[in-house]
Amino acid sequence: LADPDEQLPAIPDRTPPEAAAERDARAMAVMAALAALPERQRQVVELHYFDRLKDAEISARLGGSVAAIRVLRCRALKALRHHLEPGT
């Protein structure tokens, strides 16, 4: 068995430079849109999509009902779509 602290060699990124630049710009736009959300909405989105928590788990962590968590996520997604759509 390998040493768990041993690092694997990096896999080279073979993405064409223009595609990588577009990907990076899109990622920065998403991060900026997330940062622009009200704190509670941002927390719900991050816990749901990044930490993969279920609504009940988010509700237990942040407080509030499961229905309130769903409403917050719905509003956050609407705001993110608006922020990220071209021309808005």
Image: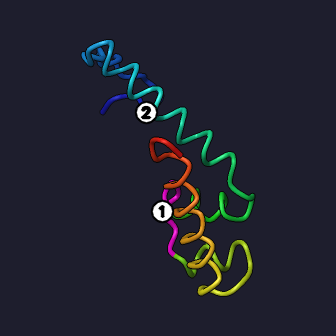
Residue at screen point 68% across, 45% down: 35
Q: Position of residue 42 (x, y in %)?
A: 65, 57
Q: Position of residue 66 (x, y in %)?
A: 60, 85
Q: Nearer the viewer, residue 11 or 36?
A: 36
Residue at screen point 67% across, 60% down: 43
In the figure, 47 relative to 72: above or below?
Answer: above
Q: Which residue is mark 1?
A: 52
In the figure, 30 relative to 72: above or below?
Answer: above
Local SS, label 1: loop
Please tell me the numbered disc located at residue 4: 2
What span is in magenta?
49-54
CA distance separating discs 1 and 2: 25 Å
Local SS, label 2: loop
Residue at screen point 39% across, 29% down: 23
Q: Position of residue 28 (x, y in %)?
A: 54, 32
Q: Nearer the viewer, residue 87 or 7?
A: 87
In the rendered view, does 15 fall on the left or right side of 27?
A: left
The amino acid type found where label 1 is placed reads Arg
In the rendered view, does 44 fall on the left or right side of 5?
A: right
Q: Is residue 51 magenta?
A: yes
- Which quarter of the image is occupied by the N terminus? top left
Mark 1 residue crowding within 10 angstroms, few (<14) / some (14–19) / many (20+): few
Q: Is residue 88 magenta?
A: no
Image quadrant assignment for residue 9: top left
Q: Nearer the viewer, residue 7 or 17?
A: 17
Mark 2 residue crowding within 10 angstroms, few (<14) / some (14–19) / many (20+): few
In the figure, 27 relative to 56: above or below?
Answer: above
